[in-house]
Image (cartoon, grey):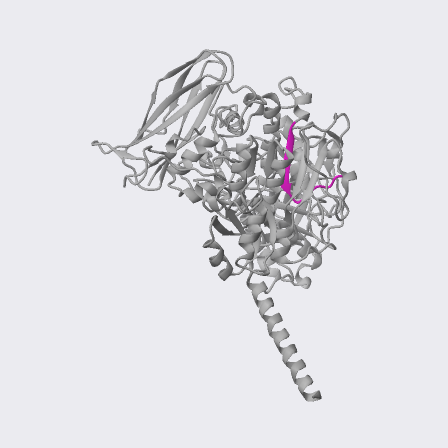
Amino acid sequence: MFSSNIYTLLLMCLCCALASSSDKSNNEARKTYIVHMAKSQMPTNFDNHIHWYDSSLKSISGSSQMLYTYDNVVHGFATRLTDAEVQALETKPGILSVLPEMKYELHTTRTPKFLGLDQDQAFYPESDSVSDVVIGVFDTGVWPESKSFDDTGLGPIPRSWKGQCEYGTNFSSANCNRKLIGARSFSKGYIAALGPINELKESNSPRDDDGHGTHTASTAAGSIVPDANLFGYAYGTARGMAARARVAVYKVCWLGGCFSSDILKAMDSAIEDNVNIMSLSLGGGMSNYYRDSVAIGAFAAMEKGILVSCSAGNAGPSSYSLSNVAPWITTVGAGTLDRDFPAYASLGNGLNYSGVSLYRGHQLPGNLPFVYAANASDAANGNLCMTDTLIPKRVEGKIVLCDRGVNARVQKGSVVKAAGGLGMVLANTDANGDELVADAHLLPATAVTQKAGDAIKSYLLDDPKPTITILFEGTKVGIQPSPVVAAFSSRGPNSITAEILKPDIIAPGVNILAGWAGSVGPTGLAEDKRHVDFNIISGTSMSCPHVSGLSALLKAAHPDWSPAAIRSALMTTAYTEYRDGKKLEDLATGKSSTPFDHGAGHVDPVSALNPGLVYDLTSDDYLSFLCALDYTESQIQLLARRNFTCDLRKKYSVTDLNYPSFSVIFDTAQTGNSVANDDGTTVVKYNRTLTNVDSPATYKVSISPPSKSVKILVEPTSLSFTQVNEKKSYTVTFMGSSMPSNTNNFGQIEWSDGKHIVASPIAFTWI
């Protein structure tokens, strides 16, 4: 009897162990998916859609739970599934699609003056209408104690606001006020993928322990703060673009990244909360619109009248490197300011090379020994100053030249310091060229261009006892030319829909001063114990909230304008030339930039307030665009969240989307919208409609053809408007001569009444 019981007990333990092993295996095989449901197909025996979602999930899995349910941006839910469960669920009635979760990454003072806002306050009165606008910022959270969120002088929270201020680690409703009116965090997708949040490293709440979210939120709508600076650099008055607008923060990014299930739920909640602008300085891989969670969420926001501004990405200067290219998203690239932070490398041979730095600390003596990192390491990649690659005996008491690449710029300085080095010169490589980004280094350091870096390396190799002095010059303004397209700013063409020109515009994104989190140093390194109220960082992450804030100003001035009208106003008034008539430069090449680099140009908010005419769009226009892409009914329903069938009797064309720019594809194979003439030219037609938003006027067209290779015909050549909101249409016919494949040319169409100039860039591509 005893032995029998022992045997039974052992058998039970073995079964439990096997079951536990099986459960663990299944759990490890599970991934997060977003399940899109056709809400209209809900069976009548269910009281509400959530019960239906839950029943559908339980029919294929006894253990999976819903992480989120969605109602505004999509109809469906997020859950963890095995491959087998995915296949089973896809066969169930009412399932549109089961899409794997995507991981997104962050795209990481003087700008009001640079943009002309300080001299033109009369154009943008800080009225109560501005304080009625709510900007939703989707990022790493917020540091509510920042002076940028001071609510002094603001009236009651808008009655339309339905959001909340959540309780969590180091955060409560008391942290919100009449400026920061909402703060929420979303982490279920992150936790499901990577495990519990380590509260020793980051707060399980809306609190920002990274700094990025505080920086973007304060850039968009930070309050006016005098005497703002970083270690004395960029000293002045800081303010967001819409200094009296309200801020609502949605924390969707954590140490391990930003997950689409969390982003979608945050966008879903923001629509419920009644935000007016959504600002997302993040991006993921390129995918079709019906598979891109940000694009899906942005479509729903657009239908609610919410403008969605997104960063273009930091993968430039490579072509086809853009993120967030859906035509209902405003895609923002980055340009420089007319401000710099020079720090010179003065060599022992008497030659000086200009660099940039935000270092503030003890000054080094002159003529210190100088060494190239590659010669102070036995590692194959020793030139990069990676962790533990430098040999202390070779760098101790010296300045070290490190090459840029792979690891963070500021981390290289930390590696040099740990090995006993006294300072650093950071040299660009081919990938960065002449682009210089200033950093608040932990040791005396300056960053120099590739050309300067090559010259300095030659000196290091030729001189048996090389020496160097680093000189820090502080802040310089009035730098020309400016703006210049940042080399890191992602570029077109648009890899998803070539006929839609992206980015839309560029805005300041290099060396931007804005609020910072009090728990993290300016470099973000663990060993950086310095605490600052403001930080200077760069990226399209910084240019995006500039446009978000400017869009809020336009929304306040023109409450009846749609997101498309606001974007059009920003695009058609953007500039592509300096005051001397020369074209905007591209920092990556030193040559003139193109619409693939700058889109419609650099934003000009004062001109955008009164653009004269706008290119408007409705959700129906975007649905017709999806029909032109030959999307299936279920793919369109993923975005539209309702039944929609393309009219088989109608001929849809992507060239008919009423966009403020033109990307013309001359397809010699005749597989797209091109038609061949007998004379060998390829013809493409575009239809556009302009809406008058000012007084009656007659506009005449002018054309800047790229070369003799393209002829442009606009019909009619003049448009007369007699009242506000009147619409007039025109057709553009582009005739391209035969050219080699992958050839690009550029031009422009302008409509003017003598008071306004409504400009649209044109990019021509032969394939």
Residue 648 point in image, percent of width and height = 33, 36
Residue 733 point in image, percent of width and height = 32, 27
Outermost residue on the front side: it is 45
Q: Quadrant of residue 298?
A: top right
Residue 186 point in image, percent of width and height = 65, 47
- Which sits in the foreground, 123 or 407? 123
Task: Count numbered badges in the picture.
Answer: 0
Residue 370 drawn above or below residue 307 = below
Residue 104, visible in the rendered structure: no
- Which sits in the foreground, 61 or 519? 61
Q: Quadrant of residue 437?
A: top right
* Image quadrant containing the C terminus: top left
Residue visible at 64% across and 26% down in the picture? 113
- Which sits in the foreground, 283 or 301? 301
In the rendered structure, does residue 142 fall within the stretch colored magenta? yes
* Image quadrant containing the N terminus: bottom right
**Left or right: 596 in relation to 467:** left
In the rendered structure, does residue 249 fall within the stretch colored magenta? no
Residue visible at 44% across and 30% down in the picture? 659
**Left or right: 195 in relation to 89:** right
Residue 2, visible in the rendered structure: yes
Outermost residue on the right side: it is 174
Q: Which residues are magenta?
A: 133-145
Residue 669 point in image, percent of width and height = 27, 41
Residue visible at 45% across and 34% down in the picture? 622
- Which sits in the foreground, 443 or 758? 758
